[in-house]
Amino acid sequence: MKIIYEKSNLLPYTQGTYLGAKKVLNVGVGFLTQPKAVWHLQNSDTVFNPMWEVSADIYTDMPLNKRKDDCFSAYAVYSYYNFGQGFIRNLGVMNPATKLDATKASFNGAGNAFPIVGTGHSVFVQAGYKLPAHFFGTKGFSIMPYSGFQMSKWDRLNSWMGIVDAGVNFLLVGNKAKITLNYQNRPVFDNSTLKQTSRASAVIVQWQIAL
């Protein structure tokens, strides 16, 4: 799973689960602020804006059977971001596209990009269940299906931004080696009305390994 809170920094990516090795319940509240963190041009002058964020989240990772070789993992967070009026950022992870046809371009930009962050409110939730390892006759290998979604009301847009992910982690050697098959469905916004006009999908396969 991705983005979930994880204390260990042994691996370079966020693990998201202890795979049943620990019982964890974590509740957090926090804020971040920085003066003159964002700038924009106004009448050819550079104008700086402060940045601040307030968030509250909850995370749990619990084994459900006596063997402790399965687990339920879930994370939920609410955030309010303020980067200045109208701020928004489109992001395309491992984007396959580099150019745009201006006559057909959406507000999203090229390829798989979508407005993932901006000034406004956002909720993110994801959950997964690791099947008991003894189902597969080994401690290292298991399967963990998961799903997640983000719903955001960015001030810049005239429609809600909602993205859905669902997939399966094939845990080859626990968190040290895994293959992920992920389906993602994202919104597409019109460049002039800033309203959602359609949705697009992507299938992502990744292999993560720690040597």
Image: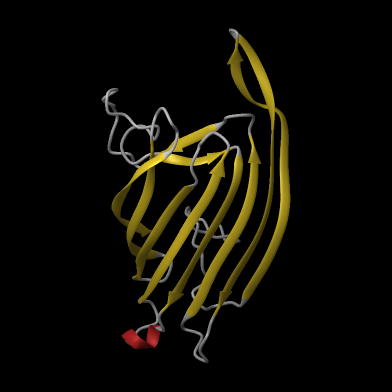
* Left or right: 103, with 80 as reference point: left
Q: Quadrant of the C terminus?
A: bottom left
Residue for point 29% across, 26% down = 100
* Left or right: 199, with 9 as reference point: left
* Residue 50 image-quadrant placement: top right
Q: Quadrant of the N terminus?
A: bottom left
Residue 91 x %, y %: 43, 38
Residue for point 39% across, 72% down = 144
On screen, residue 26 above or below 42: below
Q: How is the image coloured?
A: secondary structure
**Does residue 35 appear anywhere in the picture?**
yes
**Does residue 1 appear anywhere in the picture?**
no
On screen, residue 110 above or below 3: above
Residue 180 x %, y %: 34, 62
Q: For the image shown, how many numbered marks are present on the structure?
A: 0
Judge by depth and name the residue closer to the eye, 154 or 209. Answer: 154
On screen, residue 146 above or below 87: below
In the rendered image, the residue lying farthest to the bottom is 66
Residue 61 x %, y %: 56, 73
On screen, residue 192 above or below 62: above
Residue for point 28% across, 34% down = 97
* Residue 33 image-quadrant placement: top right
In the rendered image, the residue lying farthest to the top is 44
Residue 71 x %, y %: 50, 78
* Left or right: 93, with 149 as reference point: left
Judge by depth and name the residue closer to the eye, 120 or 15. Answer: 120
Residue for point 38% across, 88% down = 134
* Residue 99 image-quadrant placement: top left
